[in-house]
Amino acid sequence: MTEVPVPDHVDLYDQDFLAWTREQAARLRQAAASRVNAPIDWEHVAEEIEDLGKRERAELRSRLRTIIEHLLKLQHSPNQDPREGWTTTVRRCRIAAKDLMKDSPSLKPKLPDLLAEAQEGMGELVREELQGRDRLSEAEAARIGAEPLSEEQVLGDWLPPTPLPPSPPSRRHPAKR
């Protein structure tokens, strides 16, 4: 019995899902243009396959946003209590982001754009949350998200140092009589 050769696109499916979705959408559109006689809604099937790839991109951007949000909280909140949860979330989302890029390596070149998109508005979001809860000074609040985080900070092992809690107002002891 002769083995049937496996088409290259099967390998691509396992190696880079995003690239596979684009290739399959293009092939479906070619088949539709050549008027293959089959009762298939070619254009909508192609769109649905493309959307699968877009969801991979959106999922990566979402993971990056979560990482950035929690890194900003770690960087600027003086509170000690939620820090462990924020750190765990950062680590979990870093693993998920790396898995997405492993499954779809064609996402990697898009990382600078995705990072920029993910950082949009995160400083303001974190600032509002921390100002309401942590009573940050105006100067500290203004620093939140002022400098974009680098790819290494977001996806590497970096964690911001724990900020010092604000010093309590000094209390004057009444004079002893």
Image (cartoon, helix red, strand yellow):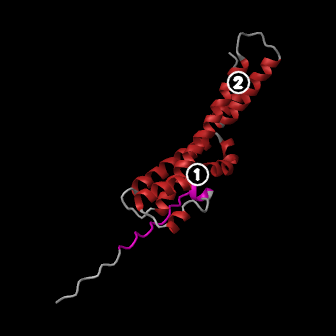
Tell me which residue sits at (65%, 52%) in the image: 116
Left or right: 150 as drawn, with respect to 29: left
Q: Position of residue 146 (x, y in %)?
A: 59, 62
Q: Quadrant of residue 61?
A: top right
Is disc 1 surrounded by few (<14), some (14 to 19) or many (20+) residues within 10 Å?
A: few
Residue highlighted by disc 2:
46
Is disc 2 surrounded by few (<14), some (14 to 19) or many (20+) residues within 10 Å?
A: many
- Residue 121: assigned label: 1
Q: Secondary structure at mark 2?
A: helix
Between circles 1 and 2, the one closer to the viewer is 1
Q: Position of residue 143 (x, y in %)?
A: 55, 65
Q: Is residue 78 above or below residue 97?
A: below
**Among the two numbered marks 1 and 2 on one chain, the one whose residue lies closer to the N terminus:** 2
Q: Quadrant of the N terminus?
A: top right
Tell me which residue sits at (59%, 43%) in the image: 60
Can residue 103 be seen in the rendering of this structure? no
Q: Is residue 14 magenta?
A: no
Q: Is residue 33 above or below residue 71?
A: above
Taking the view exactly as shown, the residue that stands out farthest to the bottom is 177
Left or right: 105 as drawn, with respect to 169: right
Q: Who is closer to the viewer here, 1 or 35?
A: 35
Q: Amino acid at mark 2?
A: Ala
Q: Which residues are magenta?
A: 151-168
Tell me which residue sits at (70%, 15%) in the image: 41
Q: Who is closer to the viewer here, 92 or 66?
A: 66
Q: Is residue 34 above or below residue 163?
A: above
Q: Is residue 155 magenta?
A: yes
Can residue 28 be seen in the rendering of this structure? yes
Q: Quadrant of the C terminus?
A: bottom left
Q: Quadrant of residue 40?
A: top right
Disc 1/disc 2 C-alpha distance (Å): 33 Å
Tell me which residue sits at (65%, 34%) in the image: 53
